[in-house]
Image (tube, grey):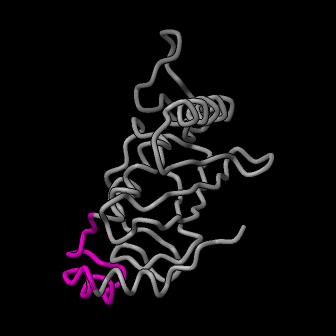
Amino acid sequence: MATINGGYQDNTPVTTPAGLPAKQNIAPATTTDTKSVLKRLQSELMSLMMSGDPGISAFPEEENIFTWKGTIQGSKETVFEGTEYKLTLHFPADYPFKPPKVKFETACFHPNVDGFGNICLDILQDKWSSAYDIRTILLSIQSLLGEPNTSSPLNTQAAALWSNQEEYRKMVEKLYKPSTA
């Protein structure tokens, strides 16, 4: 029998026959319990409903708490005032340690939104923190509407037009069609 890496278990060396590597079942440190994710999402839903923030809302889709439908209204005194956008939010099994995938379902002419509804927002990518919640995400996207990052555009046409707010507003009005649902 051979001692493996000088390892000890109950003060006894960990050994295997014929010097083969020892197999030890060690659970990954970042496993997420599905029940805790469900509890977190339910808590965030209640918090969002009680917040009373104007112009944002989101609810789970039917029986699937991992997929939500959200709504964001354009902020007052921006080119998006009077518009309302539908979003989908897909939460991963390891939420809140990984961000949800958020996408515009309503067409949105914006420098940081591509033609497929994908959003370029740092908190949904490399700046994600488990301290963020659904309310934070929705408020950040609502804020992004009126304050885009034109130096990192997904839609170059929208980014180029942004400096001319009058023309930009005309384009939003031309492309925006309020949902009838």
Q: Chief secondary structure of the magenta span?
A: loop
Q: Quadrant of residue 5 in the image?
A: top left
Viewer-side residue, 128 vs 163: 163
Report if residue 153 lies within the magenta region.
yes
Residue placed furthest toward the top: 11
Q: Is residue 24 visible?
A: no
Residue displayed at 40% across by 49% down: 139
Residue placed furthest toward the right: 63
Q: In the rendered view, would you say 155 is above or below 54? A: below
Q: Can residue 19 be seen in this view?
A: yes
Provide residue 131's location: percent of width, then percent of height: 39, 35
Provide residue 79's location: percent of width, then percent of height: 34, 72
Residue displayed at 60% across by 30% down: 46
Using residue 136 as the reference point, say whether residue 57 is left or right of it. Answer: right
Viewer-side residue, 33 vs 177: 177
Q: In the rendered view, would you say 123 is above or below 11? A: below
Using residue 138 as the reference point, say whether residue 167 is left or right of it. Answer: left
Q: How many labels does the image show?
A: 0
Q: Give the range drawn in magenta.
A: 147-166
Viewer-side residue, 134 vs 92: 134
Residue displayed at 37% across by 52% down: 140
Q: In the rendered view, would you say 141 is above or below 133? A: below
Residue displayed at 40% across by 57% down: 142
